[in-house]
Image (tube, rainbow, N blue to C red):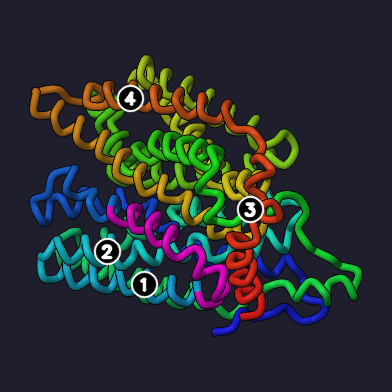
Amino acid sequence: MSPPIAPVGWSRWLVPPAALSIHLSIGQAYAWSVFKPPLEDALGLSGTQSALPFQLGIVMLGLSAAFGGTLVERRGPRWAMTVALVCFSSGFLLSALGAATGQFWLIVFGYGFVGGIGLGIGYISPVSTLIKWFPDRPGMATGIAIMGFGGGALIASPWSAQMLESFGSDTSGIALAFLVHGLSYAVFMLLGVLLVRVPRPRAEERADGRDTAPAGPRVSARQALRTPQFWLLWVVLCTNVTAGIGILEKAAPMITDFFADTSTPVSATAAAGFVALLSAANMAGRIGWSSTSDLIGRKNIYRVYLGAGVLMYALIALVGSSSKPLFVLCALVILSFYGGGFATIPAYLKDLFGTYQVGAIHGRLLTAWSTAGVLGPLIVNWIADRQEEAGKHGAELYGTSLLIMMGLLVIGFAANELVRPVHPSHHLDAVTPEKGAPDVRRHQQSESA
């Protein structure tokens, strides 16, 4: 499948909607917490067990993005979006079969493994294309697309809750909800597959006076792994994601537990609404904070994400259970930082490594997300389960987890402070011919594929 080249006069503003159709669909992953209580009741699962499909999905997201990043660069965005469509939708269909037959392992395999591959390939599919279309505003461009991933739960959370209410929260009702998800997302993602385009070759752009050739460093994906900057950003992303994803995956039961012993307990419907609010904050942070990074710089915006995030967690730990508005506000700010961190990282990579193989570099960096996808839910769920076994309840289930998240954000803040420009010795024109030529040939082949 050849990358579809934009015709003369094609508007670059048609590319973000194509990316949004993919990201809004795969962003359903952030609404997984709506399915947790019904699955736990219907199949007799613990909180840790019901998190497994989500955790595996995030692990596979990072792994498929890392191993498939170079292939996505070579084959182009339409191929990648098609693979994402097939895997993500198939994951739901397999999960529907697993729920219908009461086989939880099939839900883990379908949603987590197969669907997770769709998450990873779909997530990185538009990134390098958008940066090539918008070299002047990379933070805004990637923010628009990745905003969709954060906003997917804004649609999926109330939609899923309504389906479970209509179909029932037993195994057959859950299976039917999964089936509807799989078919609906296949149709919606197809819009992105048909709409996406890549810029015309640079020679043609120069002839039109619209040269979008990248400026700045040119570092290959292989060489990027040898730089301290890549690994510092890996730590930054991992800590920021761990701190946010732990709350997001546990959002519905967490707010219910925090206020279970108060005069204003939170209903299941209100908890689903809270998940939708978090999704809105996640979505707004991706476009708002990433666009701000174009103005104040990537390092400065990550100082905000990580430093202010510590303060928000401290407020939740100290007084969150005594004030529902404060709890919700702090959670919304944390999730806006979480989303902003995702949307800003491709532009941060572009600043440091250039646009040469930024999609492949981004894919490799998403292994940090895989790690965080295990750590965040595991920390929150495992500690909550242990605290419940010890006879504790309510906000006491999460105190230790919140302190751990604060510590992780401090580590991420320190790593961000150590980031410096990549040394010129890592640039492509500084690599020896024996090492550089294969990379150049591969890139030229991918450009002409």
Q: CA distance from mark 2 to mark 4?
A: 39 Å
Q: CA distance from mark 1 to mark 3?
A: 31 Å
Residue 74: give x, y in percent of width and height: 56, 72
Q: Amino acid at mark 2?
A: Ser
Q: Earlier in the sequence, mark 1 or mark 3?
A: 1
Residue 111: give x, y in percent of width and height: 28, 63
Mark closer to the observer (2, 3) = 3
Residue 219 tag number: 3
Residue 192 visible in the current orientation: no
Residue 257: give x, y in percent of width and height: 25, 31
Task: Examine the structure image and report whether residue 57 is included in the region drawn in magenta.
Answer: yes
Q: Secondary structure at mark 1?
A: helix
Q: Mark 1–mark 2 contact, CB under 8 Å?
A: no
Is 93 positioned to the left or the right of 71 in the image? left
Q: Which residue is mark 2?
A: 166
Q: Earlier in the sequence, mark 2 or mark 3?
A: 2
- The magenta stretch is 56-79
Is 163 positioned to the left or the right of 210 in the image? left
Q: Secondary structure at mark 4?
A: helix
Q: Which residue is mark 4?
A: 404
Magenta stretch, main secondary structure class: helix
Q: Which residue is mark 1?
A: 87
Label 2 Cα crowd, 10 Å radius (few <14 / some 14-19 / many 20+): few
